[in-house]
Image (tube, helix red, strand yellow):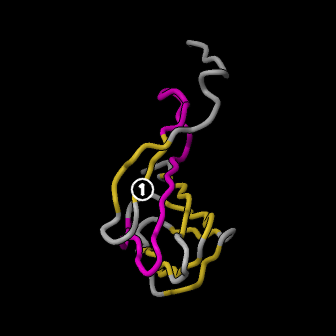
Amino acid sequence: MPSTSPATTSGVVTFDHWYDFTEGGPVHRALLPFPSTVPAPFEVARWSVPPNTANDLDVHRSREMWIIVAGTGTVTFADQTGVLRAGDVVAFDSGVPHQIRNDGPDPLLAVSVYWLQAND
């Protein structure tokens, strides 16, 4: 089994442009520095939603968690709504539609952590 140097599997993560929301801002995905033979059990992205816009309604196989870094907005998921502010965290199970509308005067910034279940 090949050894992996901690120096090559640790460090600052670089985000690259992934895609753009229809109405909101860009989404950037990070490729984590772990080898493909022992990948991280999750992936990470960061994104923004300008004032008076929303990210795209999203539904997918993976579970997902949003960490709100800045701003405020109204999150809608399944048949529920709630207000999120900087420091809040919200989680979505697979197959649950979710979206956030930026109701505040400043950009809403978030980090998304997402993963598939072991049997997916």
The chief SS type of the magenta part is loop
Residue 6's place in the image compared with 100, above or below, is above
Give how far across and how far down residue 13 sits, in percent: 57, 38
- Which residue reaches farthest left? 22
Residue 44's place in the image compared with 35, above or below, is below
x 66%, y 70%: residue? 86
Give how far across and how far down residue 43 sits, in percent: 51, 47
x 55%, y 31%: residue? 33
Task: Name the image quarter holding residue 78.
Answer: bottom left
Residue 52 in magenta? yes
Give how far across and how far down residue 60 sits, in percent: 38, 63
Task: Name the image quarter holding residue 11.
Answer: top right
Density class for disc 1 (Cα within 10 Å; few <14, some 14-19, many ≥20) is many
Task: Name the image quarter holding residue 25.
Answer: bottom left
Q: Which residues are magenta?
A: 31-59
Q: How many marks?
A: 1
Residue 100 in magenta? no
**Residue at numbered disc 1:** 27
